[in-house]
Image (spheres, rainbow, N blue to C red):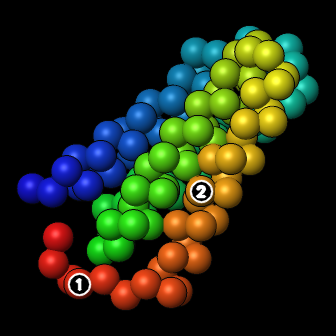
Amino acid sequence: MSSRYVLSGLMGATAVALGAFGAHGLKQILQQNPDAVSWWNTATQYLMIHAIAVGAIKSKRSAYLWLTGSLIFSSTLYAMALGGPKWLGAITPIGGTLLIVGWVMLIFFKESSHD
């Protein structure tokens, strides 16, 4: 089994777990900051979308960018939602940029269908 599929599964499982935790276990905490719920939901949504993409797409370049981008993007949003410093919001776009570049790479680079 490809390590990409393992990472895809871990990302997807983490997205589901953190989504449920945010909706139930952290509901009271997240509601104290008007932006926190939105940050949490965005982080979870992007993590899940890219978990699926990492497992479905053959492009190793894109998968690497999505893994790295998801880690940076989602973790900074989760941290801010939990009361972390707002300056983390300056790092979030780095992750977002990596996610975008991963999608653009699909346009310009054709890779072998072999892993």
At label 2, the amino acid type is: Leu
Tell me residue 39's x, y (percent): 75, 36
Would you say residue 28 is visible in this rendering? Answer: no
User: Residue 113 or 36: which is nearer the viewer?
Assistant: 113
Tell me residue 30's x, y (percent): 75, 19
Q: Name the quadrant of the C terminus.
A: bottom left
Work out which residue is located at the far left of the displayed protein and give it.
1
Is 33 positioned to the left or the right of 71 in the image? right
Residue shown at the point (19%, 50%) measured from the top left: 3
Task: Determine whether 36 is above or below 32 in the image.
Answer: below
Please tell me in which quadrant of the rendered image residue 23 appears: top right
Is 44 positioned to the left or the right of 16 in the image? right
Please tell me in which quadrant of the rendered image residue 53 appears: bottom left
- Look at the numbered disc 2 and give the secondary structure of its residue: helix
How packed mark 2 is, by other alpha carbons closer than 10 Å (few <14, some 14-19, many 20 or more), is many
Asked if the residue at tag 2 contacts the one at tag 1, i.e. Cβ–Cβ closer than 8 Å, the answer is no
Instruction: Report how far apart the C-alphas of labels 1 and 2 lie in the structure.
Output: 22 Å
- Look at the numbered disc 1 and give the secondary structure of its residue: loop
Residue shown at the point (85%, 14%) measured from the top left: 32
Tell me residue 17's x, y (percent): 44, 30
Task: Determine whether 27 is above or below 3 in the image.
Answer: above
Tell me residue 69's x, y (percent): 55, 49
At label 1, the amino acid type is: Ser
Q: Which mark is residue 98?
A: 2
How packed mark 1 is, by other alpha carbons closer than 10 Å (few <14, some 14-19, many 20 or more), is few
Residue at the spot of label 1: 112
Residue shown at the point (58%, 77%) measured from the top left: 104
Residue shown at the point (9%, 56%) measured from the top left: 1
